[in-house]
Image (tube, grey):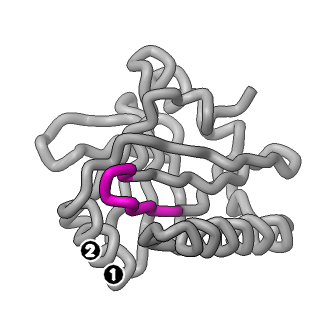
Amino acid sequence: MNDHPLAGKETAWEAVVADMEATAEAYREDGWQAVELHPGDVIPLSASGVDGGANRDDGSGDAWSGLDVLLPGNEFSSVEATVESAAFDESEVLRTREGSVVLAVLVMRASAEKQAVLVPLYYDVGEIAGVANAARTAGRLDVALRPLSNDQRVLFSLDDPELLLPE
C-alpha cells in the first residue's frame, strides 16, 4: 500500500487521541501518574520480514514481531524513566475500527506504583497478518516504543494479543 493507514481517517485518529487524553485525565483524578504518548508512526513488523518490509531486532540481535512505535525524543525519555521505576503488570485496550484500519489506545499499568502509560495505535488490517500469526503463536503481542534515533527501545508485551488484533 502506498497510502498511510490514517489517510482519510484523520478525524477518527483525532477522536482516539482525545479518548487517550480523557482516559489519562481520569487516571490522574484517581491518583495515578499517567504518561501520554503521541506516536509519529506505528508499523507492524514480523520476524519474517513481512508486514512492514523488514524485520527489526530487540537489541539482542534476535528478530521480533509486533508493533514498532516511533515517539518524539522527549516522550521516549519520559516513558523510559517511568518504566525504570515501575513494574507494569496490567493492560487495557480501547479499540475501534474505521474501515480497514484498527485504531486503539493501549494502557499499560503498574498497579502497585499507580503508574499508567497510554499510547494511541493504528494499523491496517491488511498489513498485520504476520504479526498476528506470530502473536497468536507466542501468546503475546509486543509493542516496541522507540525514539527516531532507533538506538533504544521500551518493550511492552500484551499477554492477551486478541485485545489489539483484528477479529
Estimate how packed mark 2 is, as few (under 14), some (14 to 19) or many (20 or more) residues with alpha carbons within 10 Å.
few
Q: What stretch is highlighted in magenta?
A: 110-118
In the image, farthest residue toward the top: 137
Q: Which residue lies furthest to the left in this view?
A: 60
Q: Residue at x 30, y 46 (%)?
A: 56
Quarter of the view holding residue 58: top left
Q: Does the magenta stretch include residue 116?
A: yes
Residue 71 shows in this picture: yes
The residue lying at 45 percent from left, 51 percent from top is: 108
Q: Residue at label 1?
A: 73
Q: Is residue 87 left or right of residue 137?
A: left
**Residue 131 drawn above or below residue 101:** above
Mark 1 element type: helix
Q: Position of residue 24 (x, y in %)?
A: 58, 70
Q: What element carries label 2?
A: loop
Picture quarter with the C terminus: top right
Label 2 and label 1: CA atoms lie apart by 8 Å
**Would you say 126 lies left or right of 144 here?**
right
Q: Which of 155 and 84 is in front in this view?
A: 84
Let me know if residue 120 is in the magenta part.
no
Quickly name the residue at label 2: 149
Residue at 64% from the left image edge and 74% from the top image edge: 21
Q: Do the residues labelled 2 and 1 touch (CB within 8 Å)?
A: yes
Q: Residue 64: image x %, image y %?
A: 31, 36
Looking at the rendered structure, the kind of residue marked 2 is Ser
- Residue 33, given in percent of the width and then of the height, sits at 42, 71
Which of discs 2 and 1 lies nearer the camera? The answer is: 1
